[in-house]
Image (cartoon, rainbow, N blue to C red):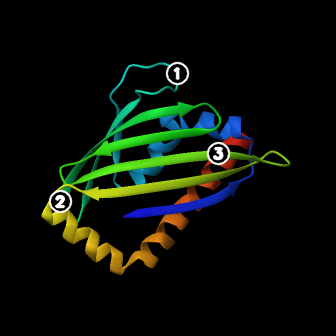
Amino acid sequence: MKFTSRIEIAAAPAQVFGQMSDLSVFAPELRRHGVRLRRTDTLAEPAAGMSWQADFRFRDRARVVHLMACRVAPQERIDYEGQSNSFLLSGAVALTPLPRERTRLHLTLEFRPRNLGARLLLQSARLGRARLESRLGDRLAELAALLEAGARA
């Protein structure tokens, strides 16, 4: 199942990329939503090979997702791959420069099931796809506001 969304941010691509590659920008917002994210690599600069472990609860069960940046093009794009017990995940964040110090952020997420339970979960998600896409758009708008505030600071 694939989700895509895009939003414009009132900040330059360099500022947006710098903030997106800094975990401390997202940590408070993620904790507010019940996600514990920790870095599992030792890289000092944003590069392919960055990795994270996300722990959260979904449908009353503890979930663990391992994420890794497989391609990093500074100020342009970050491609991710990840896995959990039930899903394989791939995602991309692409930044497009716009006039007047603005940036378009294009997010793509794709989930692939690894077992029968995951297939059933995705099938039920397909029925509520419009609601899920709306929620993704809302979260992306929150992210844009966070990045814009960080760019002004």
Of the two numbered discs 2 and 3 in the rendering, the one whose residue sits closer to the viewer: 3
Res 18 seen here: yes
Compared to 96, does 124 lie above or below? below
Label for residue 95? 3
Disc 3 is placed on an element classified as strand
Q: Earlier in the sequence, mark 2 or mark 1?
A: 1
Label for residue 59? none
How many C-alpha atoms fall within 10 Å of the one at disc 1: few (<14), some, or many (≥20)? few
Of the two numbered discs 2 and 1 in the rendering, the one whose residue sits closer to the viewer: 1
Label for residue 45? 1
x and y, in percent, of residue 69 in the image: 43, 35
How many C-alpha atoms fall within 10 Å of the one at disc 2: few (<14), some, or many (≥20)? few
* Image position of 35 (left or right of 87): right
* Image position of 92 (left or right of 82): right
Q: Earlier in the sequence, mark 2 or mark 3?
A: 2
Label 3 close to label 1 by CB (< 8 Å): no
Q: Quadrant of the C terminus?
A: top right
Res 33 seen here: no
Q: Residue at x 14, y 64 (%)?
A: 116
Looking at the image, which is closer to me, 2 or 130?
2
Compared to 19, does 2 lie above or below? below
Q: Earlier in the sequence, mark 3 or mark 1?
A: 1
Looking at the image, which is closer to me, 139 or 112?
112
* Name of the residue lying farthest toward the bottom: 127
Q: Residue at x 42, y 62 (%)?
A: 2
C-alpha distance separating marks 2 and 3: 34 Å
Disc 2 is placed on an element classified as strand
C-alpha distance separating marks 2 and 1: 34 Å
Q: In the picture, residue 80 is in which quadrant?
A: top left
Q: Residue at x 75, y 41 (%)?
A: 12
